[in-house]
Image (cartoon, rainbow, N blue to C red):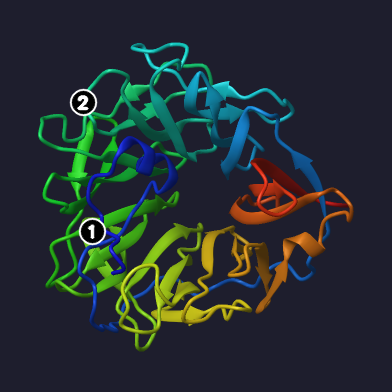
Amino acid sequence: MSGRTWGPRSRTTRRTARLAGFAGVVALSVTGGGVAAAPSAEAATPHYTLTVAPDAVQRFTGINDNGDIIGIGLSGSQAGFVIKAGTTTPVFLSTAADPGNAHQFTDAHAINGQGMVVGDIFPAGGPDILRAARWPSPGATGVDLGVDPAQPFFDVEATGINDSGLIAGRTVDPAGKVTAWTVNGSTITRLPFLPGGAQARARAVNNAGLVVGGSAVSASVVSAAAWQHGRVRDLGVLPGGNFAEAVAVNSAGVAVGVSNNTPSGEGVSQRAVRFSGGTVTDLNIPGTGPIANSTANDINDSGVIVGALPSGGAYVYRDGTATDLNTLVPAGTGFHITNATAINNKGAIVGTAQKGFGGRTFGVLLTPAP
């Protein structure tokens, strides 16, 4: 597992590695199950206009179909924000305990079509834990979801939300055990583990209530998983691998994420994959190998996928081909796109870029050019 675990993390580590991995994964499992067949991607790969975020913005993490963008920036301390469509000013996500975000940390992990945001709060002056939270709208005060409120629970994060307000997330307890859950209004539901396992992590939820993520199937194997109507399904692992996780899912139930193809655990030999119709498909992102990893971060309803290249770039994937996004934006901007984190159903992509190589990080929006 290369030392990576799903256990609690320090304040600094939490800011840079929001979701760490299952501990002790070293063996192999390939099982059936799956989600719907993949629809065809849009026929042509467009070029994009490039919009760079204001200086207070460090990275963009999501975008809804209205064009509202979420991300992480600086407002006294590190804070999640929303930039409403048609504006350029980040509205930082505050709480009643720290309205100006002078001391606490907040993360924005997902936004739905109504502009509701979920993520987590690292309370100012409180215990060294993360708390799952919901912000009803930009500028509204964040509300703790009430999941696992009693000590000694540590990290609790909300990772996905659909247009009906169904929220998915995960908890890490002091022993490093990870459990998945949903919140629907005030109802908290624990998601079952795959048979043979005792850990699970939820990462995203679509409008049909299909939750995706990963679940252990033994002490040494993690498989991608899907939950719906109280049942869990195994989405599988690439042949030869022992770790897979789905991190996004579209309205047709096609999920994307990562899987290794050697028994090396999370983060090693990691390949961008699609989970569809009971099959795990390697996207064969160029440059992916035993050392260099690729990721698939999001998929829209047309089946277009975005993610990170092993070379430190970002890609858009259509009709079986991954194209480096840096070749699809105007030349001479001085910015190098390093990751594509989300894509909406209008084809707009958000992610991160650097001013040249090794510079500071900026949030960027890529809009399909006419």
| 181 up-or-down from 117: above or below | below
Question: Which of the numbered marks, if any, corresponds to residue 200?
Answer: 1
Question: Which of the numbered marks, if any, corresponds to residue 127?
Answer: 2
Q: Quadrant of residue 212?
A: bottom left
Q: Amino acid at mark 1?
A: Ala
| 252 up-or-down from 174: above or below | below
Left-right relation of 329 to 184: right
Left-right relation of 313 to 172: right
Question: x%, y% of residue 183?
Answer: 27, 38
Question: x%, y% of residue 227?
Answer: 29, 59
- SS at circle 1: strand
Instruction: Name the residue furthest front.
Output: 358
Tell me the residue at 10%/31% (across/down): 151
First along the sequence among labels 2 and 1:
2
Q: Quadrant of residue 193?
A: bottom left
* Residue 350 visible in the picture: no
Tell me the residue at 25%/83% (across/down): 29
Number of the front mark, 2 or 1: 2
9 vs 186, nearest the viewer: 9
Q: CA distance from mark 2 to mark 1?
A: 24 Å
Q: Amino acid at mark 2?
A: Pro
Tell me the residue at 44%/24% (across/down): 136
Q: Residues within 10 Å of mark 1 (few under 14, many from 20)?
A: many
- SS at circle 2: loop
